[in-house]
Image: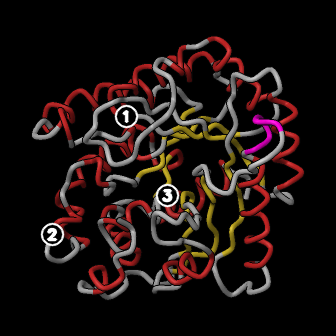
Amino acid sequence: MFDRDDWLASHQEDIIEPEREIVDPHHHLWDWPSMANYLLDQLWKDTSSGHNVVQTMFMECGWSYHKEGPDHLKPVGETERVASIATDAAKDPSKAQIAGIIAHTDLRSDLLDEVLDAHDQAASGRFRGIRQAGACDDDPALVIKPHQPAGLYLMEDFQAGVRRLGERGLTYDTWNYHFQIKDLTKLAQAAPDTTIILDHFGTPLGVGRFEGKRAEIFEQWKTDIAELAACPNVHAKIGGLAMPDNGWGYSAQETPPSSDQLVADQGDWYKYAIDHFGPSRCMFESNFPVDRASISYPVLWNAFKKTAADYSEDEKTAMFSGTARRVYKL
C-alpha cells in the first residue's frame, strides 16, 4: 500500500516557502516484509524533497521488537533500533535529524517504571514519551487494525500510568477514532499534569459503516474537539487525514491529490482544530509513510503551508516547528 513512487511522482508542485523551518513531529520507520521499507534513506528522500525539514520525531509502530526476553521489555527493541538509525543520521547534519523517540509500553503495567527506564537508556537521550493507542473497533473495512481493548482510556490503572508519565516529565501520545474523543477528554481530566497529544484529529473515519456520513461525523467531531481543547494539557497533531481509513479515496485516484484538493477537502477540519486549540498547541504532522498511500511528502507540506497562509508569522512558526520543539523538549 505504501510503495507508490511512480504514482506519487505523477503530480509535482513547486515548493511553497522553501526556507520555512519544519519539525516533522510524527513519522514511522520499518522494514516489514509485508510492505515497502521506510528507513533512513526513504525518510531522507522525503524530508529532502524541497521543504526545509530540520528535525523529526519517530512514532512507535510495533516494529523491531525483541523476540526474546520478558514481554514487557520487548518494545525496547524498537527504541534501540531507532536510536541506532538516529545516530547514523547524525553523521550527516545537513539532513533532517531524528531528534526524539516516542516509544510503546502498556501503561497499565506494574512494571511501568522499569520499562520507562529501559527506553530511556536505549534511546541515547532521545526518549520523549509513550504512545499506547486507544483506537478500538472491529469493522472489517478498516485498513489499519487496532489491537487495544475497548474503554482503555477509562481504566483506572491506565489513567494512573498516564499520570506517571507526567510525573517523569514524559508525554503521552494517542491515536483513537472520532467516537472515542469523549473518553480521551475524561482521560485528560484525570491526568491534568501530563502533556497529552492527540494524533490525526482523532481519526474521523470514512469507511465501512461510516462511509457517506462525513457531514454528520464532522458536526459531532466539532463538539467533541471543543470539549477536548478545553483541557489545557492537550495538544493536537494536525495531519494524518489522508490515511485510507479516513475515506477520502485519494489512493484510488488516477493521479494523487494536489495541495489545493487537500485544502479544499480538509481545510475546515484544520481550521476548526487550530481555532480551538490555538497555534501554540498545534503542530503539523506528516504521518509518513502511512499518509504516503495517498499523497507525496512535498505536496502534503505545500497543503499545510496553504492552510496556514492567513495566520501570523509567529503562529506559523509555532505550528511548523515551535510547538513540537517545546512539547517534546527538542
Q: Which residue is mark 2?
A: 253
Which residue reaches farthest top?
A: 156
CA distance separating discs 3 and 1: 23 Å
324 vs 186, left or right, is: right
Q: Find residue 204 and report its horizontal and vertical position in percent.
A: 29, 39
The answer to whether the residues at label 3 and label 1 have Cβ atoms under 8 Å apart is no
Residue at image x 46%, y 85%? 49
**Range of the magenta residues?**
70-74
User: Which one is in front, 10 or 327?
Assistant: 10
Q: Does the magenta portion include 73?
A: yes
**315 relative position to 273: left or right:** right
Q: Which residue is located at x 40 percent, y 55 percent? A: 239
Few, some or many residues within 10 Å of mark 2 (<14, 14–19, 20+): few
Q: In the depicted view, which residue is nearer to us: 162 or 107?
A: 107
Task: Find numbered disc 3 in the image and state the secondary structure of the residue it sits on.
Answer: helix
Tell me: 318 left or right of 201: right
Up/down of 218 relative to 127, above or below: above
Question: Which residue is label 3 attached to?
Answer: 319
Residue 101 versus residue 83 in the image, above or below: above
Report how many numbered discs are placed on residues in the image. 3
